[in-house]
Amino acid sequence: MLTLPRLAARNLWFHRRGNLAVLLGVAVGSAVLTGALLVGDSLRGSLRAKAERQLAGVEAAALLPRPVRAAVAPDGTAPALVLPGSVQAETGDPAAPSLGRVTVYGIDARFRPTADLGIDWTAPAKRNAAPIALSHRVADRLGVKAGDKVRVGVQRFSDLPRSSSLAKRGADDVTATVTYTVAAVLAPGHPAGEFSLNPSPAAPLNVFVPVAALSDQARDESDHSDAPLATALFAFGGATDRLNAELKSRLRPEDYGVRLRVPRREKYLSVESDQLVLSAAQLEAVTKAADALKLRAEPTVVYVADTLSAGTKELPYPVVAGLNAAAAAPLGPFLPKGVPALGDNEVVIPDWAENPFRGLAPGTPVTLRYYHPDVEGEGKVLTAPLTFRGAIPLTGAANDRDLTPTVRGVTDERANLFDWDRPPMLPKDRIRARVPDNGPRAKFWNTYRATPMAYVNLATAERLFAGRFGTVTSARVAPGGGEGAEQLADRFGPELLKHLDPAAAGLGFDPVRERLLTASRGGTDFGGLFLGFSFFLIAAALMLVGLLFRLALDRRAKEIGLLLATGYAVRQVRRMVLAEGLLLAVAGAAGGLVAAVGYNRLLLGLLVRLWPDPEVGTFLEPHAAPLSFALGFGLTVVMALGALWLSVRGLVRVAPPALLRGETTAAVVGPEKAPRRARWMLLGVPVGVVLIAAGAFIGNPDYRAMTFFAGGGLLLAAALAAVWLWMKRTRHTEVNGRGFPALARLGARNAARNPGRSLLTAALLAAAAFLLVAVESFRREPGKAFAEYGGGSGGFNLVAEADVPVYERIDSGPGRTDLEKQLLAAYGGKTDDPRFRAAAAELAALDAGPDGANVFTLRLKGGDDASCMNLYQATRPRVLGVPEALVQRGGFHFYQTEAETPEERANPWLLLNRTYPDGAVPVFAENNTAVWMLHVMVGGTVTVPDDSGNEVRLRLVGTLTDSPFQSELLMADARFVKLFPTQDGYRVFLVHTPPEKERDVARVLETALRPNGLVATPTREKVAAYQAVVGAYLSTFQLLGGFGLLLGVLGLAVVLLRGVWERVGELALLRAVGYRPRALQVLVLSENAFLLLLGLAAGVLAALASVAPHVAGGASVPWLRLAVMLGAVLVVGFVVAATATAGILRVPVVPALRRE
Amino acid sequence: MSLAVRALSKEYPTRSGPLPILRGVNLALGRGDALAVMGPSGSGKSTLLHILGTLDTPSSGGVTLDGTDPFALPEAELAAFRNRRIGFVFQDHHLLPQCSVLENVLVPTLVSRGTAPAVTDGYARQLLERVGLAGRLDHRPAELSGGERQRVAVARALVLKPMLLLADEPTGNLDRKTAQAVGELLLELHGQENTILVVVTHSPDLARLFPRRAEMADGALVDAT
């Protein structure tokens, strides 16, 4: 029995050809929509899978800020000494292949990822003969195999900050290079080769060596201990809390960098830092422990100054102590008779035989010259006026060489004053000149070693010698009654541990797996991004669905008319037709899900092909989440139904008698209402032009871009409104004449027969063309202005980054000398080697020129790569410290800034020196990084942890464009050293060279600083790589927009077919009166061409108008590519139209006329 | 009277001003009445028929069928009214090609309320038997001749026992002999069902079969009996 559902089903089958087209249209929409969501799934899934591979089973890790004893590793965890470094094939040739940015893992048998290699990591090996396992990437790039030798360079540890005036900073002191024998080359995909805890898609360059060997290599030369060290503890399971508890139970004070020293006099306990000065946290713990034990503790500052002088009398290199001079024994006193306490800026001097100040009257002015505690680059000598308060006997507390902490090579028993040799402040030759062997200073050293030669109060010392690492060098703790210093040490250590917080000291496990998996969700919502990219494709597919459905319905106009005539309500007809549509939409959407899998693969393939880093192709693979299928299916069905509803709505408005006659549009009778809306839209021309013109004067680039696009959009709308008005015109120009022109004019007139339909098609083509052209104009490459001072490069040809910091300027002074030494060493120490001579000559390019320095050194706080190259979420971006010299120099191209004053506008870098009431630190970032990776706008804030783990607010005060700083944030150096005091030295170098010297200087720098793992890259190349990522996105956007355009062309063909179908009788009549089929085809195709050209022209012209200021500003538009792209659309449009119309034009004349 | 048309006018707006199609048409027909309306093309015959069938609306004047003014009804009720009270036969049969003969007759019943499907199905079969197509129930329209198709259309128009049966050039596409047969069938069924039958035709032969005839001229209806 016939029922409505059966009738609907019967209809579906009977009109299967038309319905199939609708179904396919829906399937395309579903495939595109779902496919875009699957791209997001694939990115997330691939990054997650990569993260899991990278982790190699590690669940938690303690990444330690300083090396600790490997013995602290809790059970079940693997200690490792992880150091950045460089590797070079050992061939005897300085030009042998080498690699920087290598991660060197010192491991033992507990490190699971290398367990299958069969290497005994604990077997004793001679220096320069220990085994090394190389990841295939390292081995491939070095061209080495098992059995070959490689040289591994790493940063050497130091027992005091490298930037301290007493620290050695020479390249040989900072780095250590040792030869290893390649025991294994890891196969591609080996867990150890992929091992990395960094949220970055960059391929890790891993090498593995025995932890004992690496500890030995990295240990300070004067450190003769042999316990294996660790900077990381890897846990392959277990709760973080349990691991932290176990780690805490194994920690000793020295693991916190605190040592308890019993002086020779054994009168007190000296609590010192292994980094020269106690941090605030360490000092607080000592104080609390002393309080808990009811003991006295005296903070003490000891500092090596340059000169203490009074008139013509002077003492070179005095050791000055700052302390509580009135402290009771055994911690004092240090006061002349009758003096109760030392005031600020007062100094007392021990009396010794050849003391140059003997007899100096109390109250005499004394001058202290001393070095600024932080020495990087040239260093600074400061002067402090003091007042001589009196002399004290060099006995008792004053005769205590242990007041000065032991610094190996400086104050220890074996140290020699002349071996200090700490350029630039304490060069050996200067010491020797100022300290004759038989002079009083040398004699004092020989007798009293590092015993202080002057005392000031603690406040004065803290004011004069305050460095970013701290000031207090020790806390002296007095024993309780009857207690010896050794006994005190035994009970003070455990008490001290109670007050040292492992977490605050960075000695704790982090759930790194969780962090990495969180980061693997990506910095950008790729699903949303590709959905946005696919917007036009989806819109085009939906429009096509609507057109196809309407076409199918039009063929059923009489049927619908009959139903209405026999008493079906409009709602019932609509419901029945929509029910059919729903089934088509469901089937199409379901089919589209299958195609979505292919579409996803297509997009991924495209992304891999376009992405500048080929490594992405090694891990990017299709993934699919059920939710994406559900969303894609549901949204497609809803949107398709919407499109179908719009199609049906128009048809059921037609009167039943008209439908019964086969008419499918409501007859327009009577005088037409003027399309007022379209007339209003014509105002878009002047408004759009004004907007675009005004945009050139808007400072905010986002508003400027919005103005351009809004202006362009208005022009586009106005153009389409003009088309609409033309089609609605009562009288068109008379069609007359003969031949092709007349036929073409008639065809164009035919396009106006159904204005709504034609406008829809033209609008889609226009919008797609608008986007294609507008997007293309935003494709960038480093242009002519890039190399200039105000360009993206800031005038720097090279940007270099080292894994191991450099502590001196490399363009002058000791740093430059050291650079040449390093270069010489790289060439085997032969000064007559012509290759060395040629290379050394290249270094002249680094010398400061008349326009100022050619090299600027920047500090770097490591972190996540925040550039668009990193697909992971960058939660802790890298930070660069910009030296004041660079701030004052200015340059680079800014996208947007918060500059307010004329000075700031002239040089936006001055913004970095601003202070804010809320304590926010001003920073710059590359605009793309800020928008897409950090999701922050100028004026917004991001937070990063400082060296103490406190979250610091950073305010974005400006964004750069086309700069090489796309991976990091930039802040003023002065702010940097406060926030990140442990980040010693400089790791990033901006170098200006003559263009022709660029490659040579890069090569020479890399050769000289190979042990530092320095990699120098032309800024143009670096920026081009970033822009290639942007280009990849733009290309994808354009390709998908192009697909949308193609669907628009198909839509055009459908419109054409529909028009022809409606006019088949008319066309038959024309044939009957003598038109040849070819003439009819010209007639029909000219209608198609008219819409095609109209749409494309409107879109292209509006887009060109909107990007005109951008182009006038220097952007280059690839006209040829645009022309080819649009030309291809035209050709495809014509071919599709010709194919579509060919069949219909063969319809026999008589039946067609009879039908009419 | 069951069908009452009073001062019915219809005009269409054009660019040159209103174009009158019907001018004050009056008509009254009761159950069992049959009227043939003739007239030249463009005289307003079809427009009158469409208004009587509620497919079009009058510009002025009124139509009542069995005391009901259909144009005062909302769209859904108007559709139900048309479904229950009015049957149409068009010049073109407008059969659904995807449905069988029986199914085509049943199409109006699918949205009709108050009658059991079994009853309408039985009545449809009976009607098809009466129009001589009892053996063609499962055939598709494409398998029928022109006359047979029009007979199916007549059965479809009567399946819900309408009060008013309207036919717009029902024999226009048929040969003379078949046209005669279809005309006679219409009148026969009209008589059996006691409907009000209004036929618009150009065919004098068909018109002659009707007891009452009228002529449309310049939008006015003139009794020509």
Image (cartoon, rainbow, N blue to C red):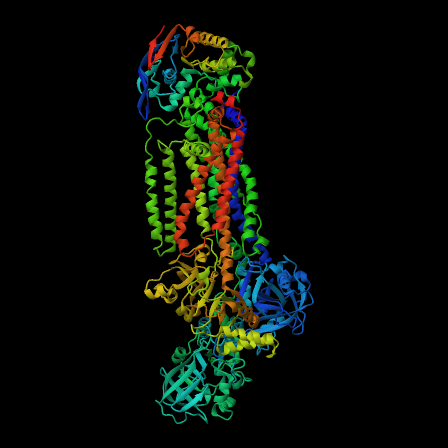
Residue A272 or residue A483, whichever sits in front? A272
Residue A347 or residue A1098, whichever sits in front? A1098
Q: In the rendering, at what x and y percent does residue B99 appear?
A: 53, 21
For the point 63% across and 67% down, the residue is A209
Q: Splitting the image into 4 quarters, where does residue A915 fall?
A: bottom left
Q: In the rendering, at what x and y percent does residue A360 appear?
A: 38, 92
Compared to residue A28, the image places residue A817 above or below, namely below
Q: Splitting the image into 4 quarters, where does residue A672 fall?
A: top left
Which residue is situated farthest in the front direction here? Answer: A738
For the point 55% across and 37% down, the residue is A591
Q: In the rendering, at what x and y percent does residue A1027 appear?
A: 49, 56
Residue A155 visible (yes or no): no
Residue A941 visible (yes or no): yes
Count of numbered labels shown in the rendering: 0
For residue A1074, side relative to residue B69 (left or right) = right
Residue A33 or residue A961, whichever sits in front? A961
Q: In the rendering, at what x and y percent does residue A687 appear?
A: 33, 46
Compared to residue A313, the image places residue A672 above or below, namely above
For residue B129, side relative to residue A755 (left or right) = right
